[in-house]
Amino acid sequence: MFLTVTWTLLGGFLQTLRLFALTLLFALPLGLVISFGSMSRLRIIKTPVRFVIWIIRGTPLMLQLLVIYYGPGIILHSNVWGSGDGGRFVAALVAFVINYSCYFSEIYRGGIQSIPVGQYEAGQVLGMTKHQIFYKIVLLQVIKRIVPPISNEVITLVKDTSLARVIAVYEIIWEGQSFIKGAGIIWPLFYTGVFYLVFSGLLTVLFGRIEKKLSYFR
Amino acid sequence: MPVLEVRNLKKSFDSTEVIHDISFSMEEGETVTIIGSSGSGKTTLLRCLNFLERPDGGMIKVKDDVLFDNDVIKSLSVESVRKKRLHFGLVFQSFNLFPQYTALENVMLAPRLMQKENGGAEGEIKERAEELLRQMGLEDRMGNYPHELSGGQQQRVAIARALALNPDILCFDEPTSALDPELTGEVLRVIKDLSTRHMTMIIVTHEMDFAHDVSDKVIFMDGGVIVEEGTPQEVIDAPKNERTIQFLSNYSKRNG
């Protein structure tokens, strides 16, 4: 029984991991684009971008998942997400990417705006180009400042993936719960917690290392 | 021929005129100090020379090179500004060293990036940077990161960094104002040393004794204009203008 449960939960966890990894893959860079938009000097860019960030950060991810999954079908009368498990997974991924890129964008914005203007000016008077100033001076300082908040957000994402079950993405908790109905046992549900703990533990160690690597300067 | 000529320079922020019609010139190898109370426009003047602010009017000329002439040049391209500002170096009040680089790397960064554009040998850049840091008395601090250095040491690294690109004129914006009193001496000493080596320098400072000691010319600014200029003996010891007298007497009262 233990092996069966482990095997089933692993299958669910694989789905969790896929959602986790793909969300990061798309949301980390997209967040940067959004942060540039939210810092734009042009009001026609800045205002709508900040409005969207407000909507996304101000409503539950659960609600966003439902709207993104069901919305197109109801409004356009066509299922843009494709049928079956694959379609639901894509819908979930899209919702996660939108949600997390907005959160990341605010972290990037905070990081970039926290760099003292003197750093830019020092680069300028030394004849550096805008590019050189960003890549050679500002970027690493920004990274150092955003690692702790990003790490927070990433660990939250590990657990948030479980929300995908509301549109029937068979992630690990869904699988664990299925044993309650199917076999009348509850311990697999607790077992899923072990997967989360181990994985978030690994991430904590990883981010701790990155922080330490960047601790050589202040 | 003067190395720097500034004519009728003007700069406003919104509707406040911070620099109102400033003209002066200096010769190669001269040390000019600018004194005056806060808000007199001293710092803005330095920032205009370094193209951190765009003047609203007037002309700036270094040697034969007209860097800025409001009557001729209506817009400055980013690229041309980048070239023009290399005539000047600027040492900031708050050092602004790059925290992720060692002292040596701070000095080498800009020359290395220049070299990518213009060519030149990596070895020479390193040698020159090390020589500059030695000149600043930092031979045993080259591998240290800024946060491991005292304020005085950081400011000396910043001076070396500004010198690394061989500017025609080195500007200092209150270089010791952010330092603890016991650390100002070491920074003033290296500036004085540069002065005796005939580095052309413009120094904005509140250190009156130092200004007296090091300057070929002292400029007193107030309300965005040059009120009085001349040798330290003329301006500091025997000021003629009422405002200069007022400023200097306030200063000596404050400093007992």
Image: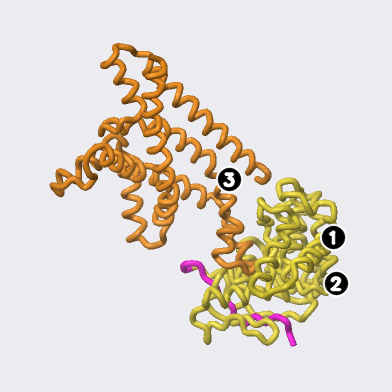
Chain colours: A orange, B yellow
Q: Residue at 56% across / 37% down in the picture?
A: A207
Label 1: how many Cα within 10 Å (few below 14, some 14–19, many 20+): some
**Numbered mark located on residue B8 in the image:** none
For the record, the magenta segment spans B1-15
Disc 3 versus disc 1: nearer the observer: 3
What kind of residue is marked 1?
Arg
Label 3 and label 1: CA atoms lie apart by 31 Å
Q: Quick one: B25 or B219, which is closer to the camera?
A: B25
Q: Which residue is mark 3?
A: A144
In the rendered structure, does residue B247 fall within the stretch colored magenta? no
Q: Which residue is mark 2?
A: B197
Disc 2 versus disc 1: nearer the observer: 1
Q: Is residue A15 above or below residue B162?
A: above
What kind of residue is marked 3?
Lys
x, y (%) of residue B186?
83, 56
Are the residues under badges 3 and 1 in a single subunit?
Answer: no
Q: Main secondary structure of the magenta part?
A: strand
Disc 2 versus disc 3: nearer the observer: 3
Label 2: how many Cα within 10 Å (few below 14, some 14–19, many 20+): few
Label 2 and label 3: CA atoms lie apart by 41 Å
Q: Which residue is mark 1?
A: B134
What kind of residue is marked 2?
Arg
Q: Is residue A113 left or right of residue A19?
A: right
Q: Is residue A186 visible?
A: yes
x, y (%) of residue B177?
71, 55
Location of residue B40 (image quadrant): bottom right
The chain under label 3 reads: A
Q: Quick one: B135 or B196, which is closer to the camera?
A: B135
